[in-house]
Image: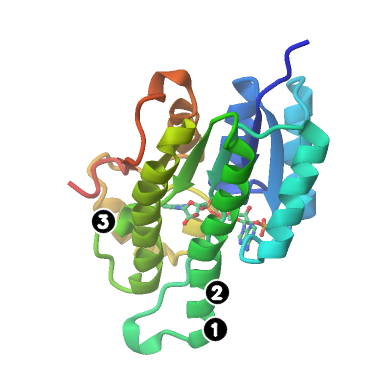
Amino acid sequence: MEENKVALVTGASRGIGRACALKLAENGYDVCVNYNSNSQKAEEVVAEIEKMGRKAIAVQADTSDLKAVQNMFREVTKTFRRIDVLVNNAGVVDDAYLLMINEDSLSKSLDINIKGYFHCAQAAALKMMKTGGKIVNISSVSSVLAVEGQGVYSATKGAVNSMTATLAKELAPRNITVNAVAPGFIETEMINAIPEDKREGYLKAVPSGRFGTAEEVAGVVAALCSDAFGYMTGQVLVLDGGLSL
Ligand code: NAP
């Protein structure tokens, strides 16, 4: 019997990660739903995937912790025996103007948004070396657009774009594609945390007149994991309702 393909989505208990996990399950993947602190939400995503007739497990791992990431990949291999897709999504934002940047917050952002992506890409590539695979990194339009107060966040997402190109070149001979999706404002808890007046200002700047949905991001991620995009690698797709134009 042919095995289902397997996807691991980091930060899949909520928001964009959750939507990616559900979309990939809809497209026939068994899914590892990674989370950091919210086990209940992660189990809800697992239950939704199981309702679609796919297998799913929730695995707690702080992606900034290399050992935790390696244990998570061991668990995925033990359960599913293969891994075809990694969606590097788990990320944090903690806006501050330059003079207000706090050392702990700076370290946390660099650890999760950059080191975490490398930890997972490395562990996934190790498993995909013989089989090929797809890695999709969730970047942000802030990587190509200067937003005041987002110096740290922008820098981490700029790093995601750079690593996407380099890893794509390194892994292309192994039939592993590496691409990134750079969303603009997407309606998730991350955006809901922005004060109302600031949110309204952001909304006015979006030519399409609305924030995007997590499902719209997931649609692009799932497309990048399909055979239709088998020859595309190292690219960053901006998905922002025209914000950066
Ligand atoms: P969100 O609603 O805040 O959800 C964040 C997710 O990441 C949660 O599942 C959380 O797990 C997980 N997470 C956080 N730190 C983690 C860690 N150290 N290890 C493992 N998981 C961790 O965020 P979102 O809006 O969906 O954003 C997802 C990604 O899209 C991020 O990389 C973000 O930078 C990017 N993005 C978002 C927007 C936007 O407008 N929302 C725009 C551009 C880019 P727990 O639930 O367990 O805490």
| Relative vertical location of residue 10 with respect to residue 218 in this rendering, above or below | below
- Label 3 vs label 1: CA separation? 25 Å
Q: Which residue is mark 3?
A: 144
Residue 242, given in percent of the width and then of the height, sits at: 23, 42
Label 3 CA crowd tier, 10 Å (few <14, some 14–19, many 20+) = some
- Assign a secondary structure to mark 3: loop
- Checking the image for residue 104, the label placed there is 1
Q: Residue at x 41, y 36 (%)?
A: 172
Q: Residue 26 location in percent, x, y? A: 62, 22
| Image quarter in which the N terminus is found | top right
Q: CA distance from mark 2 to mark 1?
A: 6 Å
Q: Answer yes or no: do the residues labelled 2 and 1 have beta carbons within 8 Å?
A: yes
Q: Position of residue 13 (x, y in %)?
A: 67, 48
The amino acid type, in three-letter code, at marker 2 is Lys
Question: Which amino acid type corresponds to the residue marked 3 in the rendered image?
Answer: Val
Q: Which residue is mark 2?
A: 108
User: Which residue is found at the position 35% from the left and 53% from the top?
Assistant: 161
Toward the bottom, the furthest residue is 99
